[in-house]
Image (cartoon, grey):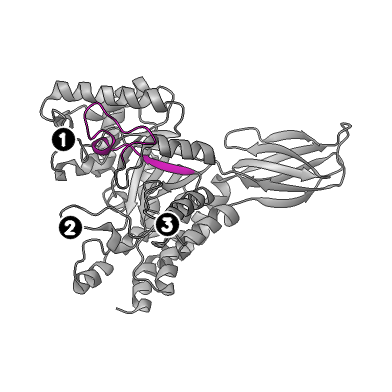
Amino acid sequence: MDRKEIRKIWMKYAEEDRELLTSRVERDIETHRKGYCKVRVLLKDGTPLRNGSVKVTQKTHDFQYGANIFMLDEFPDEKLNLRYREEFKRYFNLATVPFYWKDLEPEQGNPRFAKDSKKIYRRPAPELCVEYCEESGIGAKLHCLIYDAFLPAWLPKDDMKAMERRYEERIRQIAERYSGRLTEVEVINEMLLERRWSGQGVIYQKRDLIPWAFELARKYFPHMPLVINEANVLVSLSEEDYRHPYFMLLENALMSGATIDKIGIQHHCFTGSKAVTPEMYEAEVMAGSQMFRPSVLLRGLDYLAEFGLPLELTEITVPTFGETEEDEKLQADLLDLLYSVAFSHPAMETIVYWNLPDSYAYAHPSGRSDENRCRGGLFRKDMTPKQSALRLREMFQSRWHTDLTLTTDKDGYVEFRGFYGDYVLSAHGEEGSFGIHKHENNATVIQL
């Protein structure tokens, strides 16, 4: 299959929904991601800066955009480790930190919190990750408190009471070290997939599992945003609406008192991950493009937004259908499309990409699937940025970024609309800080 045919298949729906992209998506980005601001600029003596030139520069985004940080200090080459550290904070303001129980506590009573803990591939110690985030000025997100796909072998998996006690002890230990140091906490993950797992514990037989899990998390993280996370659901949700399992699961959980603060949705397009022959790969390439149809994405997000809670795309993978420049451009275009639609939705607060570099993704032990086959990284194996990484950086640091030169009026005021975040205003060689934040009165006075 040639490159033009692949592009035609995967960008088909973007062309069909072109009017939607140029109407609702562009309009809603302007409406929901920017706010009105009025700043009065005073000179040192307290008089207004009249008809003076000022520069307004956005320094941070309130919107969170990140990736998992699973390869922090995990490369055999120290130059790659340094590059990973440098690039992560250049591109993102949020990191998903792994707290998988199986690898956090492989030996009972000896959790791997500390930076000098024994290494486990793609599972850097939480303290290493959180400290890096604190030093780099980016948020750290916990993934995940309850996820029975990855349990340590020593657990009494068939004893309900014992498992309840073990889970509470796990959550208590984590909270003691990290409460107040995290941006948010994923409480439970992939409920709709749990029947596919081997070696899971009895805890998933609880009918009130979600309310129980959130009550436990709230006990130890009383002030943290608590997130529920689920696998790919947007396409099927757009078709099944209120009868979709995730919608009904959420509705039941909330009616049962679960204190969910944020609804998470994965959006992995693992095209090629199960293909072990060229024929299988070609067949896979023909499927999956519906995941990038703007009207489908927005319809699914609209259904979830009816709960009145913030939304988050928690895990994203966009495939690269080869190693050519054209392949990389298509990945960048698909990522651009997906992020633009998600960023435009008023309920969306966070977008998290999954794996940064190619060749270091998850591979199932059985060999039946290997995420590396889909080349879903934003960076190449050597940590040089692909076009998708450069595009993502352009979106958040240029296209969706406010940088203006304005002139004050006779009373020293400037007015403008800017993307939500923290700002610096410069004039006469002096600076002053201010912010534009949703649901706030964004009027301020800056004295130089």
Locate residue 249, reporting x and y percent.
25, 36
Neighbour tally class for label 3: few under 14, some 14-19, many 20 plus, Cα within 10 Å: many
Judge whether 149 appears above or below 282 on screen: above
* Local secondary structure at mark 1: loop
Is 289 or 114 nearer to us in this picture?
114
Q: According to the image, label 2 marks what residue?
A: 367
Residue 48 makes an appearance in the image: yes
Q: What residue type is labelled 3?
A: Leu
Which numbered circle lies on residue 408?
A: none
Identify the residue at horizontal 45%, vertical 52% (top origin).
Answer: 84
Question: Which tag, 1 or 3, sits closer to the chain's start?
Answer: 1
Q: What separation in Å lies between label 1 and label 3 (alpha carbons)?
A: 39 Å
* Local secondary structure at mark 2: loop
Neighbour tally class for label 2: few under 14, some 14-19, many 20 plus, Cα within 10 Å: few
Asked whether, in this view, residue 280 is left or right of residue 138, the answer is left
Mark closer to the observer (1, 2): 1
Q: According to the image, label 1 marks what residue?
A: 153
Identify the residue at horizontal 29%, vertical 60% (top origin).
Answer: 372
Q: What separation in Å lies between label 1 and label 2 (alpha carbons)?
A: 21 Å
Locate residue 145, reporting x and y percent.
30, 32
Dividing the image into 4 quarters, which one contains the N terminus?
A: bottom left
Q: According to the image, label 3 marks what residue?
A: 338
Asked whether, in this view, residue 92 is left or right of residue 307, the answer is right
Residue that extends furthest to the left in the rendered view of this protein? 158
Q: Does the magenta portion include 199?
A: no
Badge 3 vs badge 2, beta-carbon distance below 8 Å: no
Question: Which tag, 3 or 2, sits closer to the chain's start?
Answer: 3
Q: What residue type is labelled 2?
A: Gly
Residue range (magenta): 94-118
Is 364 or 80 nearer to us in this picture?
80
